Image (cartoon, rainbow, N blue to C red):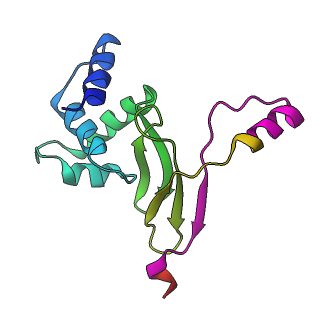
Amino acid sequence: MSKALEIIQKTLVAKGHSQTKPRRQVLEVFFHNDKPLTPAAVRKQLPDRNINLASVYRAIELFCRERVLTEVDHVQEGRRYELSDAYRTHHHHLVCGSCGETEDFEDCEMDDLEKLIRRRYRFKVIRHDLRFIGLCQSCQQ
């Protein structure tokens, strides 16, 4: 088990949440994937095939409330989630509007824009996310 995964589980227990088998397995799936996942995609990757989709949804909902996961987008298959920036490198997404494939990109040049927003609008940016929607290389052909 990775150190980050262990820390998350201890933090959840300290906040009064049980460390159940479905929660542990759902969290492990996210730690082993670097792409946003729908709850159905998570369930397909669970080692225990007896864990039902409702349990996956409940685990994801809890992890979002505790800021372990973040909702990335909503595609035809449903909402997709991934680990929050607290548990992985800050990044943005390139989303294919045709097939829905999502690719991460880590180049973030938003510091100057955040300063402009703070100055011009007196708005303190706490976090940001950015998606570019277009066509992936496969769908362009």
Where in the figure is residue 27, as x and y percent of width and height?
A: 27, 36
Q: Is residue 116 magenta?
A: yes
Residue most toward the bottom? 141
Work out whether residue 110 or residue 24 is closer to the camera in this orientation and state it. 110
Residue 49 visible in the current orientation: yes
Q: Quadrant of residue 7?
A: top left
Q: Residue at x 59, y 45 (%)?
A: 129
| Residues in magenta, as a range | 114-138
> Total marks drawn?
0
Q: Quadrant of residue 99?
A: bottom left
Q: Quadrant of the N terminus?
A: top left
Q: Say whether residue 99 is left or right of residue 97.
A: left
Q: Residue at x 25, y 39 (%)?
A: 26
> Vertically, is 82 above or below 96?
above
Q: Residue at x 36, y 52 (%)?
A: 37
Where in the figure is residue 118, as x and y percent of width and height?
A: 81, 32
Q: Say whether residue 46 is left or right of residue 92.
A: left
Where in the figure is residue 33, as x and y percent of width and height?
A: 30, 50
Residue 55 visible in the current orientation: no
Residue most toward the right? 120
Work out whether residue 134 or residue 59 is closer to the camera in this orientation and state it. 134
Where in the figure is residue 75, as x and y percent of width and height?
A: 47, 60
